[in-house]
Amino acid sequence: MKQIEGGVTAAKGFEAAGVEAAVKYQNRKDMALIYSTAPCQAAGTFTSNLVKAAPVQWDQRVVAESPFVQAVVANSGIANACTGQAGMDCCRAEAEHAGKKLGIPAESVLLASTGVIGMGMPVDRLCAGIDKLAAAKAHSLEAGLAAAQAIMTTDTVSKEIALRIQITGKTVTIGGMCKGSGMIHPNMCTMLAFVTTDVKISKEMLQRAVSATVVDSFNMISVDGDTSTNDTLLVLANGEAGNEEIQGEGEDYDTFCQALDYITTYLARKMAGDGEGATCLFEAKVVGADTKEHARILAKSVICSSLSKAAIYGHDCNFGRFLCALGYSGVSFDPDKVDLCFQSREGRVEVYSQGTPLTYSEEEATKVLSAPEVTVVADMHMGEAEATAWGCDLSYDYVKINADYRS
């Protein structure tokens, strides 16, 4: 497995574009296109929120029912959520317009939106944006980056990655991009994530891989405890690598899954570290748990704690907050057996062991907690299961960003 430059255009047969359509924002890219020159198998996972945006509903039907997919159209600025029948009509208009411009069926066009909830969609601007996207699409790395930039809202950086692997003697490429900064919480997040690959794989096995990969990646991050209406992960596979089709479990499937896990974990960590107002990626690693599920619950409880997040922002080794978060997670454990430490590129400091606070240097602890990535490690001494969750610190800027988000 080798990481290479690029994102969604790295794999064979994929083109992309990002353009300014003035959907809501001015003087910035706000519409993106991913296009495959060949029909794709498609798989996806979506928000667990009962209030689902119109494009989520559209995509769920397309992924389940359409024989193939060939394009994704995404916009930032307006979420097309809580918009009633008008929202669904907008999806139909977008897909039909994109289909005509690209020469593919409307039912092969997936859609994604992110931004303000409850605002009406400017269909005329969206269709004009699609015209620009169709004219600008290219296979270049620059085109992939433009698409990654166009889906950003409060993100401070674009997020993309690509890998190359070998399957049945063929070079297979997987590329991905995502956006996400606020309204991020386990069970998917305010995230749009798109992965493209030239691997040849059956629809059933692709969906199995996608459903599995989110469990320890996108479902293990949180910024603010809010689960969005628009969460969407779409994976498109066009088979252009020419490998023998993956139709079941085995070495080839495992190789693909390992690469997909790397992609989704990388993107998940990038989203957590770019949380609204964040200054630090906050990682919680639970080891020695009795079951994998309990390890996940414990780790997520720590990174979701507002008090723990505030302590990370203040570089304050207030370890009681982290123990407290473990304690109310709902998982039963013996507090007198827990070990707790903090670590970063600046070092490691042990703060609690076997029910007793340890003597440590506050100066050294502050130094460790001042790094751009900080990990709290909790050893439960119950078994061999472990899990990692990712979040960010809680700064003053989070409230500033969200207090007047619509305006």
Image: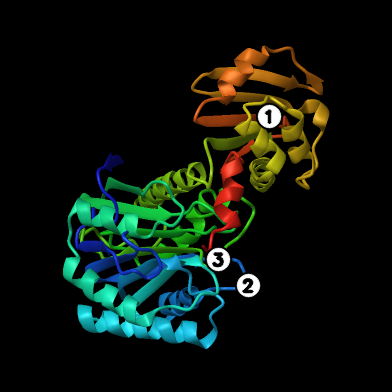
CA–CA distance in space, label 3 to label 2: 8 Å
Q: Quadrant of residue 241?
A: bottom left
Q: Name the residue under label 2.
A: 50
x%, y% of residue 78? 46, 69
The residue tagged 1 is 379
Query: Contact (CB < 8 A) between labels 1 and 2?
Result: no
What amino acid is at disc 2? Leu
Quick check: marks 3 and 2 in contact, CB under 8 Å?
Answer: no
* Disc 3: which residue: 47
Q: Residue at x 62, y 25 (%)?
A: 342
**Quick one: 230 or 67, which is closer to the camera?**
230
Q: Residue 321 at what x, y percent from top left?
A: 75, 34
Q: In x, y percent, where is residue 149? A: 33, 55
- Marks 1/3: CA–CA distance: 31 Å
Upstream in sequence: badge 1 or badge 2 = 2
In this rendering, is residue 395 above or below 100?
above
- Packing grade of label 1 (10 A; few <14, some 14-19, many >=20) is many
SS label for mark 1: strand
Which residue is drawn at the image coordinates 69% and 43% (left, top)? 306
